Image (cartoon, rainbow, N blue to C red):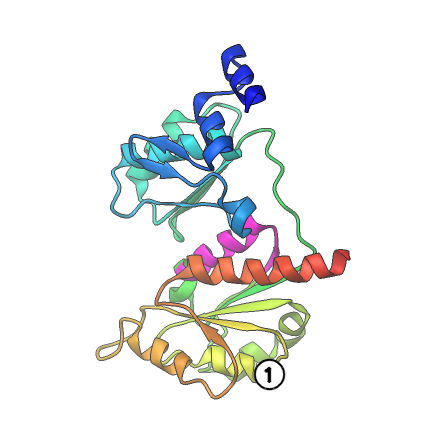
Amino acid sequence: MRDILDAVASGDLSPAEAEARLVGYATTDAGRFDAARERRRGIPEAVLADGKTPAEVASMAMAALETTGRVLVTRADDAHVAAVTDDLPADATVDHDERARTLVVHAPDFEPPDLDATVAVVTAGTSDAAAAGEATVLARAVGATVDRIDDVGVAHLGRIVDHLDTLRAADVVVVAAGREGALPTVVAGLIDTPVIGLPVSTGYGYGGEGESALGSMLQSCTVLSVVNVDDGFTAGAQAGLIARAISGARDE
């Protein structure tokens, strides 16, 4: 503790960094940023922009950058992105996925994790790309290599069959599908890899907001796990944790 206090006194450590090291989080006007989450859970803390003002998101993002060397913002609109990027140092790297509504920022000295494991992220249709994109960002943030396979829904089974080699080579697979949500069940019946079903709120009429896709995946006769509707964050994080465990086993 004395070393931390001396570092603050000398200007080598900011008060936010010191607080994060001592108690595991940094306090901002917008809330508390869990700076120790990645060390504790293997998943980096993200700033959910939904329900927060642009100024609040920017405040949390700056705390993240200062204490962990990176920022991960989800469900961000243009105003959130502008507020964060306006406050960034000039040498930070920025990756904004407008469709997935994610923003990833790295400090120049940040060293991202690198796992010896691959996550395949699959979409049944192009309309499923937003949720799948969020899952992709999370899996990459954990350090996994991500292979994307897009627009291979069950309306033409030949499309998914064409990618069986890639699916079977992956360590874990996330499958995003709307409408009746059949694709995860089909994929899980063809490979011996863990499959995470990601129901998406696309479709017509009754059950078209993701309810039918969720119900179908929960009732799957092939073994898979399922996250909530449009919850690419949890799907990508769970896939990343599996990839992390596999990578750790390979390193032993």
Examine the rendering and report whether any part of residue 76 can be seen.
Answer: yes
Quadrant hosting residue 231: bottom left
Segment colored magenta: 131-147
> x and y percent of residue 123 in the render?
47, 68
> x and y percent of residue 9 in the render?
50, 12
Q: Which residue occupies the extreme right position in the image? A: 252
> x and y percent of residue 169 in the render?
68, 70
Q: Which residue occupies the extreme left position in the image? A: 205
Q: Does 137 lie within the magenta span? A: yes
Quadrant hosting residue 15: top left
The correct choice, above or below, for 193 with respect to 107 in the image is below
Q: Which residue occupies the extreme front position in the image? A: 2
Q: Which residue occupies the extreme top position in the image? A: 10
Which residue is at 37% across, 35% downward? Answer: 60
Which residue is at 56% across, 69% downward? Answer: 173
Q: Nearer the viewer, residue 44 or 101?
A: 44
Left or right of residue 188, residue 83 in this image = left
Q: Nearer the viewer, residue 120 or 238?
A: 238
Label 1 is placed on what type of residue?
Leu
Assign the magenta stretch its main secondary structure.
Answer: helix
The C terminus: image quadrant: bottom right
Left or right of residue 140, residue 179 in this image = left
